[in-house]
Amino acid sequence: MPSIPSGLRGATITGWGTALPPKVLTNHDLEHMFATSHDWIVERTGIHERHVGGTTAGLSIESGRKALDMSGVDPATIDALVLATTTPDRTVPGTAPGVAAALGLRCGAFDINAACSGFVYGLVQAHGMIAMGARNVLCIGTDSLARITDWTDRNTAILFADGSGAAVLQHTAGPGQLLGWDLDADGSAERFLYAEVGGFIQMEGKEVFRQAVRLMVDSAKKSLVHAGITIDDISLVVPHQANIRIIQAACDRLGVPMDRTALVLQHTGNTSAASIPLALCDALDAGRVAEGDLVLLVGFGAGMTAASAVLRWGPIPATRGHQL
Ligand code: ACO
């Protein structure tokens, strides 16, 4: 992918929000559902608990409303809603139009499915629309994976969960926050992670692990090159929250210490398209990002897809508060 041409209209994130269903399923709860243990799950994945329940629309409306409120933008100036999800509530229509209606938006609204890479795909799409004249775009990543998880299958049920994260992108006078990006998909690897229509997620965990580390590192390196920076310039890495060992292996290969990484998977599990925005919002709410900081978002998912983006953070709204 080439670098971003100069002179395009830029965008910056001015509001964000999250949503997690109230029901919490701990590892100890799972011990009563199939043969596993809290210690095994923590050692192999880093996950302690996860939230399950709700619908993709319901979670999206909650996170989207928080992001709109924080940004303070007039809903009439939102020109598009991009909803990244791999678990739409229905096959037809897409989930995004109903979410837009519930939020009082009248604009283009559509779903994109790039699995766990979806939010970064959506963010790149949003920047593209703003470069082409859109004023403001609401980008949401939501998944309700509990509905497509076999809760008797210990290979997958320890990992997946539900949640949502949203960001409002506003056009800016200057070049904006996106410095470099990369999107990738290798359909020849789709057999390692998939769910048929009406079926449960099927996964070859070891192979997904191997592919994930390679895909994340390759994509991150491309975005860094496109942004004209090195990993040492990055203040915070926001990786897809799939497995702490995948994140550790990718960070080792990239040469970035774990204390410069945003992590929420211990409390959220793998929420697919919601995972990166949940971790990003948590870091923002905790004050881990200052104006001018460089942030690297990097994810991988079923497809197999991968996506990354380097953002230079804009002004932090004073109304920030802890949401997770
Ligand atoms: N509890 C207890 N024991 C278990 C469990 C469990 N939940 N699952 C497997 N085991 C056992 C196995 O039977 C095996 O026993 P054996 O040695 O007697 O045969 C042993 O533990 C090791 O099993 P492995 O499958 O080799 O375990 P591994 O270390 O590979 O960890 C895991 C499994 C956690 C699934 C890992 O492979 C992984 O995280 N892979 C990536 C998955 C992922 O990220 N998926 C999401 C992608 S993003 C998206 O698009 C949604």
Image (spheres, rainbow, N blue to C red):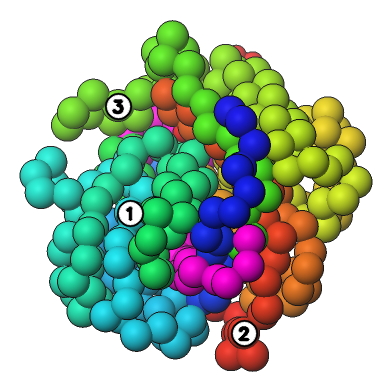
Q: Residues within 10 Å of mark 2 (few under 14, many from 20)?
A: some
Q: Which residue is mark 2?
A: 317
Task: State whether residue 8 appears in this view.
Answer: yes
User: In terms of sequence position, does the residue under pointer 1 or pointer 2 come before the other?
Assistant: 1
Q: Which residue is mark 3?
A: 195
- Of residues 91 and 81, the one drawn nearer to the viewer in this rendering: 81
Does the numbered disc 1 mark a residue whose Cβ is under 8 Å from ligand 1? no
Q: Secondary structure at mark 1?
A: strand
Amino acid under disc 2: Pro
Q: Nearer the viewer, mark 3 or mark 2?
A: 2
Amino acid under disc 3: Ala
Q: Position of residue 299 (x, y in %)?
A: 58, 39
Q: Which residue is mark 1?
A: 83
User: In terms of sequence position, does the residue under pointer 3 or pointer 1 come before the other?
Assistant: 1
Instruction: Decide: is 260 above or below 115.
Output: below
Q: Secondary structure at mark 3?
A: loop
Q: CA distance from mark 1 to mark 2?
A: 23 Å
Amino acid under disc 1: Leu
Asked whether, in this view, residue 74 is left or right of residue 228, the answer is: left
Q: Residue at x 61, y 62 (%)?
A: 176
Task: State whether residue 38 appears in this view.
Answer: no
User: In terms of sequence position, does the residue under pointer 3 or pointer 2 come before the other?
Assistant: 3
Quadrant assignment for ligand 1: top right
Q: CA distance from mark 3 to mark 1?
A: 20 Å
Image quadrant containing the N terminus? top right
In the image, the segment drawn in magenta is 150-175
